[in-house]
Each structure stands twice: as C-alpha cells, then as structure tokens.
Image: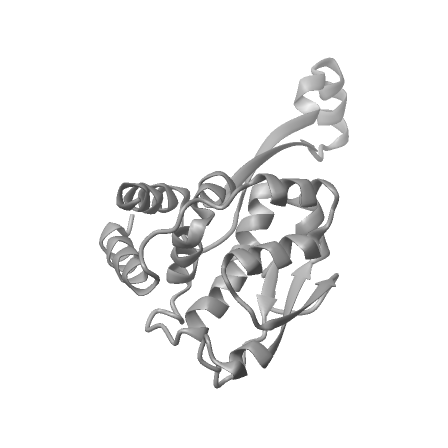
C-alpha cells in the first residue's frame, strides 16, 4: 500500500481546498439513481463540487478511451476557476450507458465524482492535476469518501458451464455438480485499491 504517497497527497489537497469537507448527503443521489435520472445525478455532483461552468452530458454506447466508464474533454489551457472565462466554458462529459445501468449506485457516484474532480484540479491549476490517484483523493476530500469506501470495488458470482468431451459428459451426467463451476469476479473503479481508499478515508475522518 502506498501510505506515504497517499498521506502526502491528502495533506496537499486538504491545504489547497480549505480542509476536508463534510460528507455529501446520499439520499438525493440515491433517489435520482432509482429513477434512472443519471443526468440529474451528474448535475447534483457538479453542484456539490461548486463547479459553475457549463456542462454538456452525453450518455454513450461506444467510443472514447478503452475501458473508461466516463471521461471529460478538458481544454489544453484551462481557464482559472472563479474567473468569468471558467463560468462561460462549455465542457462535455461522456458516460457509458452500460456503466450507469449495470454498476451499483455507489460505483456510479464514484465514477461521476472522479471525472468532475478532474475539472476541480485542472481549474485550480493544482500541481497534482495529472495524478489520477490525486483525482480520486480530491473527490474523497470534497465529500465523496463514503461512496469510495463502499463503491470502489464489488464482486459478482456467476455459474459457468464447463466444456467436456463426450465421455466426460457421460460421466458428468452421474455427477451434475461437475457440469458447472462458480466464478467470482471483482469489479473495480478508480486508481486506488480498496485498502488505500480505507486508509485515505481514515486520515480524512481524523482531520474532520
């Protein structure tokens, strides 16, 4: 576990944004998720992160960086946060429909908060803005650490039918349980392990 790096990043992020913020209330986001109001969720996270630029949202089925559930196109020269040029800027956030519909509520929130935290760090021209781990930690410091604790990974269990030769299939008829096997798959999001998320959240909780 990268304890030293995480401790340093948390300290620098906390100093940059006036300390560790209180936890974001879960209920409004959960209600919107139940209604499948995903754009509403994105707008709500944007508001809690105090991002007042114009944001266009695209729910997509393909394209974009491979394996990325969501992404934002940031300009090469990001206007400084708080300036009129920042408020007038129009960004586009893309989110995969499969991610929104197939992943648990907490993981969806983590994905949204991570992408919008890119805007927070880039808009403030933060020295850590290109460090993906720092992006996760920024979202946690700005109120989303409980979502990261519960949603940075989860496991699914599935039954997979085994492929057998004719003779082995005949034998398997007498032992049905041998026809399939249980496979557990762990799904992750973000750039911190579950252990690192728990460690960072503990530091932030102490600072609160």
Work out which quarter of the rendered image holds the C terminus and state it.
top left
Residue 119, visible in the rendered structure: yes
| In the rendered image, the vertical position of residue 58 relative to residue 80, given as above or below | above
State left or right for residue 130 relative to residue 41: left
Corner quadrant of residue 39: bottom right
Residue lying farthest bottom?
A: 77
| In the rendered image, the vertical position of residue 107 relative to residue 92, given as above or below | above
Residue drawn 41% across the image and 43% down it: 194
Residue 18, position in %: x, y? 32, 59
| In the rendered image, the vertical position of residue 127 relative to residue 102, given as above or below | below
Residue 134, position in %: x, y? 37, 61
Residue 89, visible in the rendered structure: no
**Front residue of 31 and 1:** 31
Residue 82, position in %: x, y? 46, 75
**Front residue of 170 and 153:** 153
Residue drawn 71% across the image and 40% down it: 34
State left or right for residue 30 relative to residue 6: right
State left or right for residue 97 relative to residue 110: right
Corner quadrant of residue 93: bottom right
Residue 126, position in %: x, y? 36, 72
Numbered-mark total: 0
Residue drawn 56% across the image and 77% down it: 87
Colour pattern of the rendering: one colour
């Amino acid at each position: 576990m990268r304890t030293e790096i995480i401790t340093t990043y948390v300290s620098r992020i906390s100093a940059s944004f006036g300390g560790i913020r209180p936890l974001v209330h879960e209920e409004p986001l959960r209600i919107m998720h139940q209604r499948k109001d995903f754009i509403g969720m994105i707008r709500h996270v944007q508001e809690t992160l105090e991002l007042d630029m114009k944001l266009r949202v695209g729910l997509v089925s393909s394209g974009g960086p491979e394996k990325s559930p969501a992404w934002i196109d940031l300009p090469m020269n990001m206007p400084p946060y708080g300036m009129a040029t920042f408020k007038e800027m129009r960004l586009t956030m893309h989110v995969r429909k499969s991610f929104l519909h197939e992943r648990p509520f907490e993981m969806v929130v983590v994905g949204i908060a991570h992408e919008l935290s890119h805007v927070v760090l880039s808009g403030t021209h933060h020295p850590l803005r290109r460090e993906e781990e720092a992006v996760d930690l920024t979202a946690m410091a700005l109120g989303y650490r409980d979502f990261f604790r519960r949603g940075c990974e989860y496991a699914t269990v599935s039954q997979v039918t085994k492929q057998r030769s004719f003779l082995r299939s005949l034998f398997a008829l007498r032992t049905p349980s041998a026809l399939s096997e249980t496979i557990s798959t762990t799904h992750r999001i973000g750039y911190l392990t579950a252990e690192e998320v728990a460690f960072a959240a503990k530091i932030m909780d102490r600072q609160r």
